[in-house]
Amino acid sequence: MNPETAAAFSLLSAEAVRTRAQHMLTLGLDGKLPNFRVDLSQLDAAAERVIAVTRQNYPSLDIPFHSRWRHFIVGGVDRFERIARAAGFKDAAARARAEFDLAIISVFLDAGAGPQWRYTDQESGQRIGRSEGLALASLDMFMRGAFSADAAQPLRVDASVLAHLSADQLAQGFRVNADNPLVGLEGRAALLRRLGALIAESPGVFAQNDSARPGGLFDHLAASDDGKSIAAPEILSELLHELGPIWPSRITLGGIPLGDCWRHPAMKTSDATNGLVPLHKLSQWLAYSLIEPLQRGGLKVTDIDGLTGLAEYRNGGLFVDSGVLVLRDPSQAARAQDAGSELVVEWRTLTVALLDRLAATVRERLKMDSHTLPLAKILEGGTWAAGRAIALEKRRDGTPPITVTSDGTVF
């Protein structure tokens, strides 16, 4: 393996995300970043916000993991669980494959929807936007068999269907029109087409016990190590290695596409990764969302705190709106920023490191530890909801403090 390829693989891990984020925070605390000042004196207030929202959402502090599965619960009803019980899967592995199918599709369609788009839920009549609306739209398409090649088995996703999915089909499923625009529609459809093509080309991973489907990844992960347990960071590493090529080729190194990885001049190293900052937001969101299917499928998932916080605009917005992160040039907040801009990369990277700091403060206040309150539960309790709440306090439409131009494949 040439040095550049080895260097590229070193960035495809949760450890790389955390290590570089902590380095960025150190630079910020030393006043050496071009776009943000870091004011840790405001961290306690941010932690109190998170605790207040967590107690409101989960009074007993019995908090589930932050994952896509929470968005399938509407009005207290777990829509997927209801479907799964009626489906009568033949065994735990068959259900796990279906859950992997749904989670992978739904997460990859989960980049920011934009402020205008809404999905009308046929069951409740509610018009639901943002991540929850995207979840329901993807669940409804899955239920109808929109991703299945077999009409007799609607609850599956087939590579052959994904490979030919059009933006028009996706628009129909998500009820997109001129009055209900969805940001990055074509980018989302193209991402799923690339996913379908990649899966079809990798039967050794995705077709061990069935035709090629995203859910085949369950069998691949279940066969790892002793077949009884898997570490959460290993889930992420497998996702990045097996599915990494589907992401737009923003940056490649040694022939390896790096996905959600960006350039920032402050990130100095002595090897080929100089200036590169990995974040892997959607892949980590997916890794969190695969934990429960793996557990239900009979595997023990360890080292859940080995994954990092998610570098997205609700978590990041919490720190900006609460004053932990302060723009050096406040006028930047009024300008739409490209996802690869120095400012956005800096913001997202600092968010990852600050989530670790905030988690420690929250645990201390609640007299809990990383075992009873892992980061996955703090995110759910939690930081994401607190970021949305403070955004609504600060801005009537609840938009984040910094606007990012998205193609539907970042966050």
Image (cartoon, helix red, strand yellow):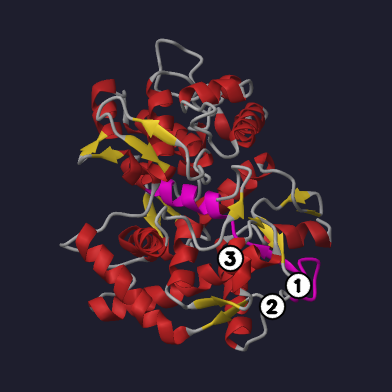
Tell me the kind of residue under disc 3. Ala
Residue 333 is tagged as 3
Tell me the kind of residue under disc 2. Pro
Locate residue 307, reporting x and y percent.
48, 61
Q: Tag 2, which secondary structure?
A: loop
Tag 3: Cα neighbours inside 10 Å, few (<14), some, or many (≥20)?
A: some
Q: Mark 1 and mark 2 in contact (Cβ < 8 Å)? A: yes
Locate residue 243, reporting x and y percent.
62, 42
Q: Residue furthest right?
A: 2
Residue 62 can be seen, yes or no = no
Tell me the kind of residue under disc 1. Pro
Q: Which residue does the image show at 65% across and 75% down from the upper left? A: 35
Q: Tag 3, which secondary structure?
A: helix
Q: Tag 1, which secondary structure?
A: loop
Could you say which is closer to the camera, residue 31 or residue 361?
31
Residue 265 is tagged as 1
Residue 34 is tagged as 2
Q: Is residue 144 magenta?
A: no
Which label sits in the foreground, 3 or 1? 3
Count of number-bearing discs: 3
Q: CA distance from mark 3 to mark 1?
A: 21 Å
Of the two numbered discs 3 and 1 on the same chain, state the one appearing first in sequence.
1
Q: Is residue 274 magenta?
A: yes
Q: Is residue 163 above or below residue 256?
A: above
Give the residues in magenta.
268-291
Q: Is residue 130 above or below residue 23?
A: above
